[in-house]
Image (cartoon, grey):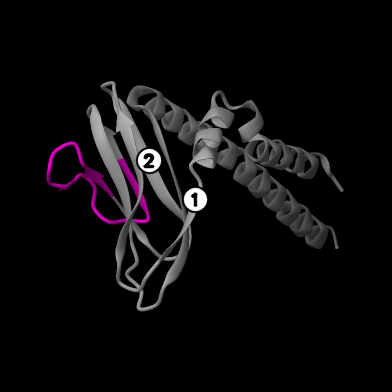
Amino acid sequence: MNYKAIAIGIVIFLVGLVASITMPFYYPNYQEVNSVYASHLSYVVIPAGAEKIVSNFTTNSTYNAVIAFIQSGTGNITIFNISSADLKQITTQSSLVSAELTPGKYAIAIVNPQGIAQNISYTYGVFNANFLNSFYSGLGILSTITEILTLGGIAITIIAVIYEIINRKRKK
């Protein structure tokens, strides 16, 4: 039996899997972005059907962007510009929102669409928009490459095993 192709498939699979799992350790700025999200992680109880402003922040420079998301619980996030007298909604309600911001004051609100009170955990990060764009674009490309390696290794292994099974049946 020729195990060479099976071994190559398993090695490619393992390389892809290890590269995918260890990405937070070697991808540039991953820890920095993660620490921003970790520093803003909060928990809040939102009454049934209610909306509550849970955080305020200010941006002083142009080209800033915010990403906010629900980590646990059922809720939707909305971001408001509160620089003027009236609240101006700048994002629609969703469990993940992102928006490019101009200098000003902003508020993050969470809406509970459920009929019961919810304990919701959420986090957000304010970053330079260009940095954020390149960070997530590169991360997406690298994730795709590691997925292709992982699935390619699985495919090579399966094809090699099927080929060996067919060859064994022909020899009998």
Q: Amino acid at mark 1?
A: Ser
- Asked if 2 appears above or below 118 in the picture, the reply is above
Secondary structure under the numbered disc 2 in the rendered image = strand
Q: Nearer the viewer, mark 1 or mark 2?
A: 1
Name the one closer to the observer, 145 or 158: 145
Q: Amino acid at mark 2?
A: Ile
Label located before the other in sequence (1 or 2) = 1
Q: Quadrant of the C terminus?
A: bottom right
- Asked if 168 appears above or below 107 in the picture, the reply is below
Q: Is residue 19 left or right of residue 47?
A: right
Q: Is residue 32 left or right of residue 70?
A: right
**Residue 156 falls within the magenta-colored stretch:** no
Tell me where the magenta segment starts and ends, as one range: 79-98
Q: Residue furthest left?
A: 85
Residue position marked by numbered label 2 in the rendering: 67
Q: Position of residue 22 (x, y in %)?
A: 67, 35
